[in-house]
Amino acid sequence: MTSSEGPWRATILTLFPDMFPGPLGVSLAGKALASGLWALESRDIRASATDRHRSVDDTPAGGGPGMVLRADVLAAAIDAADAGPSGPKDRPRLLMSPRGRPLTQSRVIELAAGPGPLIVCGRFEGIDERVIAARGLEEVSIGDYVLSGGEVAAMVLVDACVRLLPGVMGRLASGTEESFSEGLLEYPQYTRPQEFEGRTIPEILTSGDHAKVAAWRQAEAEALTRARRPDLWAIKARQKRPKSTTDG
């Protein structure tokens, strides 16, 4: 989404700004970035350090392994990022964290419709809890595993948002007829050649009967979701269940 203040913008706070744009600089996202459909700002957290060693971390209170990003340094970095014209005050402030709420397609759609987020990439053992509360950081996870830092996770989130921005994908339907758009996994896709190593394209897809093709795709999407993502299927089943008179 673009506004009077400019294109959708992602601001990344990281100790490794040279990691960006990385994969975001190629393919669809890279072309859209070069053409001005969205903007990327990568800021070094270390620039907000105040001592001569540019220290950004310290030992955990209470003891334990590793180091923790300091609240004062990170808060200063967030404030500096939001002080200029590229930092609208109403944009989401996200922290990529394995303890965050799982990133979903519905949340991606919300973020893509806004001005663009400020994303904090943690390192070490994490960041001081006080800055999370003081700066209203929303913790977001891309899966139940731990990465070396939040940068790769931030790239995943940004890529998921950018592809939904107007003008990025060739066809609007490309962003609507896919996994999770209707609470289901996407149906199988086929293209030429007609036969590949003895396997053929299902006849119904070449029949020209659009109603039958749509019904086949719906049935395949439901079957895949039941088999691979029973958690999603349970939600879909509850949504389809008729409301009883006792539900109020």
Image (cartoon, rainbow, N blue to C red):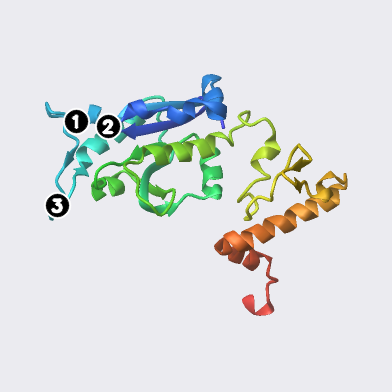
Q: Tag 3 or tag 2, which sits nearer the N-term?
A: 2
**Amino acid type of the residue that numbered disc 3 sits on in the rendered structure:** Ala
Could you tell me how far apart the alpha carbons at marks 1 and 3 are, in whole angstroms?
20 Å
**Would you place residue 157 above or below residue 7 in this image?**
below
Please tell me which residue lies in front, 56 or 98: 98
- The residue carrying mark 2 is 45
Q: Quadrant of the N terminus?
A: top right
Q: Residues within 10 Å of mark 3 (few under 14, many from 20)?
A: few
Residue at the (44%, 36%) spot, across then down = 155
Q: Name the amino acid, label 2.
A: Ile
Image quarter for residue 215? Answer: bottom right
Circle 1 — which element? loop
Neighbourhood count class around disc 1 (C-alpha, 10 Å): few under 14, some 14–19, many 20 upward: some
User: Residue 49, labelled with which disc?
Assistant: 1
Q: CA distance from mark 1 to mark 2?
A: 8 Å
| Residue 140, position as x, y percentages in the image | 41, 48
- Asked if labels 2 and 1 touch by Cβ distance under 8 angstroms, the answer is yes
In the rendered view, tell whether residue 233 sits above or below residue 131: below
In this rendering, position of residue 21 left or right of residue 8: left
Q: Secondary structure at mark 2?
A: helix
Above or below, 155 against 60 in this view is: above
Side (left or right) of 144 relative to 177: left
Q: Is residue 208 left or right of residue 39?
A: right
User: Is 238 left, or right, of 25 in this rendering?
Assistant: right
Is 220 situated above or below 46? below
Residue drawn at x 42%, y 54% is 101
Q: Which residue is mark 3?
A: 61
Give the spatial CA distance, label 2 vs label 3: 21 Å
Which residue is nearer to you in this view: 143 or 140? 143
Q: Secondary structure at mark 3?
A: loop
Image coordinates for residue 110, horizontal then vertical, percent: 54, 44
